[in-house]
Image (cartoon, rainbow, N blue to C red):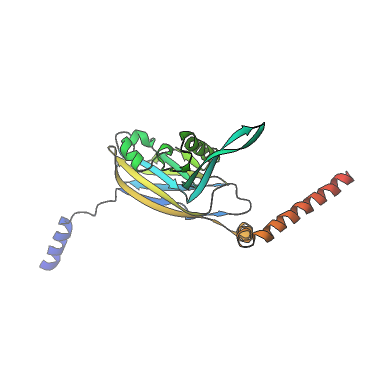
Amino acid sequence: MRGLLLALLLLAAAPLRAQPALVAELAQASVEITTGFTGASILVFGTAARPIGPNGDEILVVATGPGQPVVVRRRVQVAGLWVNGPAARFPDVPGFYAIAGTRPPWEMLPEPERQERRLGLDALNLRGTGRQAPAFRAALVELKQKEGLWAEQASPVAVAGGQLFHARLPLPDTVQTGDYTVQVLLVRQARVVARQELIFRVERVGTAAQINALARQAPALYGLLCVAMAAFAGWIGSILFRRG
């Protein structure tokens, strides 16, 4: 009996397990690209141990896609014709980049830390070869934004009940396959105090996957089939217009 009472006293005196400062999750672990794929969105949600909002904690969500090489060319006019001119090659460009927060990152963090963490399009590490004029970098950023592949404050992080948050990150229909990383950062008094990393995969399925596999494994056959299908479509069109 004395042993049981001693155990209860020790349990009561023990400190409660601390609640994690940040807990985040994705609503889905994969995005499937089919032949009718028109885009999708990734829902990120979670909770913080302390209240989120003015004078409290803040949330940043950053999604990054697989890197890929990109060549940016300048078109120049020669003898009345537009031709490819100077170019810059960027060997490792994020195929997708989206950032959302309760506020923009440049309002939450000191500039050195924001640049170090690559938070914002102007903070991306876009080192290229060839022409290094700022205009090439600016053209690359503008191109990715027009394609919907890069976005700042894509959608604001919404807060409910003071400690629950969620954000939707849009994925355009041109998004590439591969593994994507989502970082959820908890900012307190202009410092990142907690971080959680999540992963989701974009993959082709069904007919889209078969077509992609054929294009990679047998490009010559794929080209012939495309030509044959185009010729067949043209032939059908000529018959229909002739009858009309």
Q: Residue at x 41, y 41 (%)?
A: 124
Q: Residue at x 61, y 57 (%)?
A: 212
In this orientation, does residue 162 appear?
no
* 86 and 49: which is toward the camera: 86
Residue 115 location in percent, x, y? 35, 39
* 210 and 161: which is toward the camera: 210
Residue found at the very far front of the displayed protein: 79
Residue found at the very far right of the displayed protein: 243
Q: Residue at x 71, y 55 (%)?
A: 226
Q: Which quarter of the rendering shows the N terminus?
A: bottom left
- The tally of labels here is 0
Q: Is residue 113 above or below residue 13?
A: above
Residue 75 location in percent, x, y? 59, 36
Residue 210 location in percent, x, y? 62, 61
In this orientation, does residue 129 appear?
yes
Q: Is residue 65 above or below residue 104?
A: below
In this rendering, position of residue 236 left or right of residue 201: right
Residue found at the very far top of the displayed protein: 80
* 160 and 8: which is toward the camera: 160
Q: Residue at x 61, y 62 (%)?
A: 217
Q: Which quarter of the rendering shows the C terminus?
A: top right
Residue 58 location in percent, x, y? 34, 39
* 13 and 83: which is toward the camera: 83
